Image (spheres, rainbow, N blue to C red):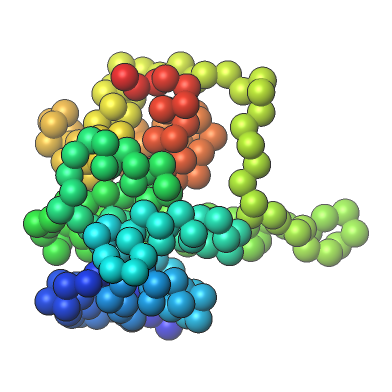
């Protein structure tokens, strides 16, 4: 069964263009014209990923994602913001409320497709690990909580290499892997490896958590 993607944008032309592209790429797509409708569709259909505009009527993207992240069943849902708001402050706010990637308009459909594939692949791996975490000593399946635990007070600030620091600083500005690669003259695959290393060192699950960790522990200016 095709993976299901929710596209929330008050611009009907953008909704249609993204939907057509994603359906041609093999995904199933549902659309919403504002944040309120998007939340209802999330609760009904439980999509595998959400693409959302920020500036929408009734409920904007920030409030939508904030409410989504407060629900344990959607904590690991990959979220991409598409928006004309491209200041550093706006991007940081987007990551703080819980988006995984911030893609400014105008954007290339091919890049959106690559980002979606990357986030879905990682999400499917995480879900599989949670689902098949192995039996406990009684032979019953282990119950896995998806409620995020607060960081341990003994948790130490990780030591980063010079290149990891460069990738982290660019990541917190909202750049995608290809854009970071262009800045550092590295391939997107190499950037993905650095991002994976940063996630492992900071014990975070996605880019949003990584940005929050970096800001909280002053890993970036």
- Taking the spot 38% from the left edge, 51% from the top edge, the residue there is 99
- Taking the spot 46% from the left edge, 40% from the top edge, the residue there is 209
The image shows a total of numbered marks equal to 0
Give x and y (percent) for residue 173. 25, 35
Q: Quadrant of the C terminus?
A: top left
Residue 33 horizontal side relative to residue 38, left or right: left
Comparing 163 with 84, the one in front is 84
Where residue 171 sits, quadrant-wise, is top left
Task: Classify 58 as above or below 173.
Answer: below
Question: Is any atom of residue 79 visible in this view?
Answer: yes
Comparing 62 with 186, the one in front is 62
Give x and y (percent) for residue 32. 31, 77
Residue 21 horizontal side relative to residue 119, left or right: left
- Taking the spot 30% from the left edge, 34% from the top edge, the residue there is 172
Task: Classify 96 as above or below 159.
Answer: below
Residue 221 horizontal side relative to residue 39, left or right: left
Comparing 79 with 192, the one in front is 79
Q: Quadrant of the N terminus?
A: bottom left
Question: Is any atom of residue 51 visible in this view?
Answer: no
Comparing 28 with 102, the one in front is 102
Give x and y (percent) for residue 176. 23, 44
Where residue 116 sits, quadrant-wise, is bottom left
Task: Classify 104 as above or below 162.
Answer: below
Task: Classify 175 as above or below 133.
Answer: above
Give x and y (percent) for residue 42. 46, 73
Which residue is farthest front? 58
- Taking the spot 34% from the left edge, 42% from the top edge, the residue there is 93
């Amino acid at each position: 069964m095709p993976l299901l993607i929710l596209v929330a944008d008050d611009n009907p032309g953008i909704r249609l263009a993204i939907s057509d592209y994603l359906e041609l790429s093999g995904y199933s797509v549902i659309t919403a014209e504002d944040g309120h409708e998007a939340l209802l569709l999330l609760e009904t259909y439980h999509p595998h990923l959400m693409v959302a505009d920020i500036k929408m009527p009734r409920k904007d993207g920030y409030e939508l994602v904030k409410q989504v992240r407060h629900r344990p069943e959607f904590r690991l849902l990959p979220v991409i913001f598409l928006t004309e708001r491209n200041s550093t402050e706006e991007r940081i706010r987007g990551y703080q409320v819980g988006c995984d990637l911030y893609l400014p308009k105008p954007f290339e459909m091919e890049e959106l497709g690559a980002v979606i594939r990357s986030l879905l692949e990682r999400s499917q791996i995480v879900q599989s690990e949670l689902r098949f975490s192995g039996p406990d000593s009684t032979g019953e399946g282990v119950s896995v909580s998806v409620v995020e635990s607060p960081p341990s007070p003994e948790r130490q600030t990780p030591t980063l290499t010079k290149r990891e620091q460069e990738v982290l600083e660019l990541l917190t500005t909202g750049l995608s892997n290809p854009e970071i690669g262009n800045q550092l003259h590295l391939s997107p695959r190499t950037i993905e490896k650095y991002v994976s290393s940063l996630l492992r060192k900071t014990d975070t699950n996605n880019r949003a958590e990584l940005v929050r960790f970096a800001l909280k522990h002053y890993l970036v200016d």
